[in-house]
Amino acid sequence: MTYLNHLTLNTGHLRRSYRSEVNPSALAHTRDLLADAIEAGGDIAMPVDRYRLHVEPFGSRRAALCTVSRAAAPIMSMGVAARPARALWGQLIAMRHRLQLDGPELAEPDAPWCAALLLPPSDDDHGAMAWLGDLERCAAWAWIEGAA
């Protein structure tokens, strides 16, 4: 596979994220971070001070829900799926509805996909906005390649 569908749930923006966009060392580091989070029961400190990563596998580990928090406040949740994942998709859409976001109804993208939802505490976290998109892409590829 050469690309995954990368969706921003806040806006409905969908783009193809190509595997070639991910630096191999960043991918290896992110793969280790995800594995360490799972081994620690789902939650781990990130290399960025005051941030934590929570990883919850779905199904037979072909999908996952990841949440990044700053000082215990979730700032972004994302789902990643190597194959269609209706249960995970439903959870993400329910989270989106709770935020009462304007925008079109969204259908689950063709797999493989990742879908990110920026949460209200992210509005004041301009520093995280500089790296969250890269983390989404790296985490998605790391998870999908591990699930294949």
Image: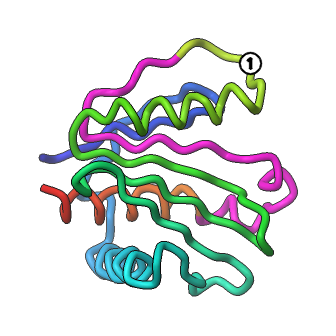
- The number of callouts visible is 1
Q: Would residue 3 appear left or right of 21 to someone viewing this image?
A: left
Residue 11's spot in the image, x, y percent? 63, 28
Q: Relative to 107, is 18 above or below?
A: below
Kind of residue at badge 1 = Asp
- Colour scheme: rainbow
Return the x and y of residue 54 as percentages of the image width and height.
Answer: 54, 68
In the image, taking residue 2 as reference, residue 65 lies left or right, namely right
- Given residues 143 and 40, the one toward you in this image is 40
Q: What residue is shown with label 1?
A: 102
Please check the rendered image and state whether residue 104 is part of the magenta-colored stretch, yes or no: no
- Is 57 situated left or right of 84 in this image? right
Give the x, y percent position of residue 134.
49, 61
Quadrant occupied by the C terminus: bottom left
Q: What residue is drawn where x is 80% and y is 75%?
A: 71
Range shown magenta: 106-131
Q: Which residue does the image show at 53% across and 29% down from the upper left?
A: 13
For the residue pair 2 and 139, the one nearer the viewer reads as: 139
Residue in view at x 44 percent, y 60 percent: 56
> Which residue appears farthest toward the top when viewing the image?
104
Q: Residue at 56% x, 71% y: name it.
A: 53
Res 27 quadrant in image: bottom left
Q: Name the quadrant containing residue 12.
A: top right
- Seen in the picture, residue 124 relative to 25 is either above or below; the reply is above
